[in-house]
Image (tube, rainbow, N blue to C red):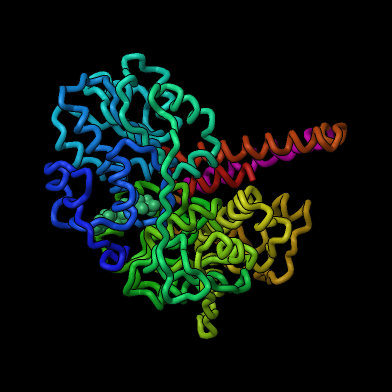
Amino acid sequence: MDTKRALTGTRFADLKPPISDDIIKALGSGFEFCTPVQVATIPLLCSYKDVAVDAATGSGKTLAFVVSLVEIMRRSTSYTPKPHQVMGVIISPTRELSAQIFKVTQPFVSTLPNVNAVLLVGGRKVKADMKTIEEGGGNLLIGTPGRLSDIMQRMDILDFRHVEILILDEADRLLDMGFQKQMNYNISRLPKAGLRNPVRVEVRASESSSHQFTHSKTPSGLHLEYLVCEADNKSSQTMDLQIENKNKKLIVYFITCASVIYWGFVLSKIPILKSISLIPIHNTWEDEAALFTEATSGVLVCTDVAALQYDPPQDPKVFIHRVGRTARFGRQGRSLYYVEFMRLRKVPLQKRKCSENSSDVIPIIRSAAMEDQAVWEKGKKAFVSFIRAYKKHECSHIFIWRELEVGKLAMGYGLLHLPSISEVKQHRLYSDGFTPVGAIKFQDIKFKNKDSKTCKKGERNGKNKRKEGKARKGRKMLMLLKLTGKQRQTIQTAEDEEEMALEYRLLRKPKKRLITEDEYLKITDLIL
Ligand SMILES: Nc1ncnc2c1ncn2[C@@H]1O[C@H](COP(=O)(O)OP(=O)(O)OP(=O)(O)O)[C@@H](O)[C@H]1O
């Protein structure tokens, strides 16, 4: 956030009704003046009004609701609350956001004696959360819809009759993301909850440099660009951007974890990028993100799954949110429709010229793949995972997977040959633009590191499994032929979902260090 431009002349200490001294102290010297959204919402919330807020990302909404919530809780804690008396609930769509909100609340909650805040998100055992609440209480619950409803159902000990304030952070995403059942349940448990004649607050950043947009969804200090290039030129352009911004911090988003693994691996092998520190996020993302936060320059390669996209994000709102928060520019737009779509949503995008002097990265990646089987394997996996993720894109009306130019795409990945996958074979995707590397014996390509030996063992087991897989596929095809088109479609969808679930389970294994990344790639190759 461009702090100076984003602040108003109103101090937190001047707000009416007034905010407690302890909260002003907790705000410290860093937060003296309010942002527009804070001036507009804190007085309303602190006057017990229901408020619906629409403001650009990074405009200070979190601090606005945290300050208001703690102020309201303070007023009702003139008596000491019982440990299991819930007074406030904050629901947000993702684990990361919940964790971040939890962090922001800490200095303020600590001004309230005998009040406990608990973070309730997936990814850890429900029983552990239940124990924390049983032992330490939970006066303020912050979490994701699923885990919150789980806790609410399991823990009769929690008393929701005294809830003074409910915050739904990113309410549109909460309702979009298929949480309706959990959200309904959560809200039904809060007797006082409901929007009663809410005051609507809309705060927009003014975009002075562009005449096209008078009111933008993104912060005014944020400059967004898009670049149009052929799929086989995308990796070279990305490399060029990395070089251009080598003294800055850059985040490159990919759509799948396999892509992060591949590009994190392969980019580190490109001589011209050697001086740039590369931080791929796919394991202990907290540590790596902390590393990136502390660094003065470097490239963070990550997915939406791991933490926070090179690829189109599944949800355009995610794009606005992530870019608004972290990046000075976003590289987007395989599809111009997407650009138009973003414009319609008041996201100001400017066209960036494709660099004509970028070095061609493909021969470098290919020669790395010919020297190391790991590069080749990771590349195949990344490419296939991209196609599968693209196929399931939430904006499938814009990102039409059948129109993917897989030939050029595979070229851009630096693949040695075009992987033979059902999507390409059955749907005859456009494979022009791919030049296979001729006269190469794939079995002669060695793995460079020791872990890869384990992979080779897995490879022998893999061959038997592939045979079994083919026989099973044959039987399945016979069965499918006997079904109607609609029945076939239902089965296919169920299978796609199952496959995704299986991939996700496998993905967690390297994270928990149960298997190596290379083993993961080998195993997953078997289910492709
Ligand atoms: N009044 C203020 N003075 C100075 N800095 C502020 C102020 N309010 C918020 N900030 C800082 O601005 C950044 C963005 O704030 P915040 O996360 O609250 O925005 P947001 O609107 O909730 O963003 P998002 O929609 O992305 O979650 C944070 O680093 C926060 O510390």
Q: Which residues are magenta?
A: 452-478
Which image quadrant: the N terminus? bottom left
- Residue at the extreme top of the image, as rendered: 156
Magenta region, main secondary structure: helix
Q: Say if residue 416 shows up in the picture.
A: no
Q: Is residue 326 left or right of residue 80?
A: right
In this view, the residue in front, 240 or 189, is: 189
Name the spot of residue 50 as percent of width and height, x first. 39, 38
Q: Position of residue 413 (x, y in %)?
A: 57, 65
Examine the rendered structure and indicate whether residue 256 appears above or below residue 20.
Answer: below
Q: Is residue 503 left or right of residue 43?
A: right
Q: Is residue 406 in view?
A: yes
Look at the image and say whether residue 459 sits in the magenta stretch. yes
Eyeballing the image, is 84 above or below 3?
above
Q: Quadrant of ligand 1?
A: bottom left
Outermost residue toward the bottom? 357
Q: Position of residue 437 (x, y in %)?
A: 65, 70
Q: Position of residue 182 (x, y in %)?
A: 49, 28
- Name which residue lies at 37% across and 27% down: 125
Magenta run includes residue 295: no
Q: Is residue 288 above or below residue 169?
A: below
The residue drawn where x is 40% and y is 22% is 191
Q: Which residue is pictured at 69% across the width and 65% down the height?
A: 405
Residue in front for this viewpoint, 226 or 181 = 181
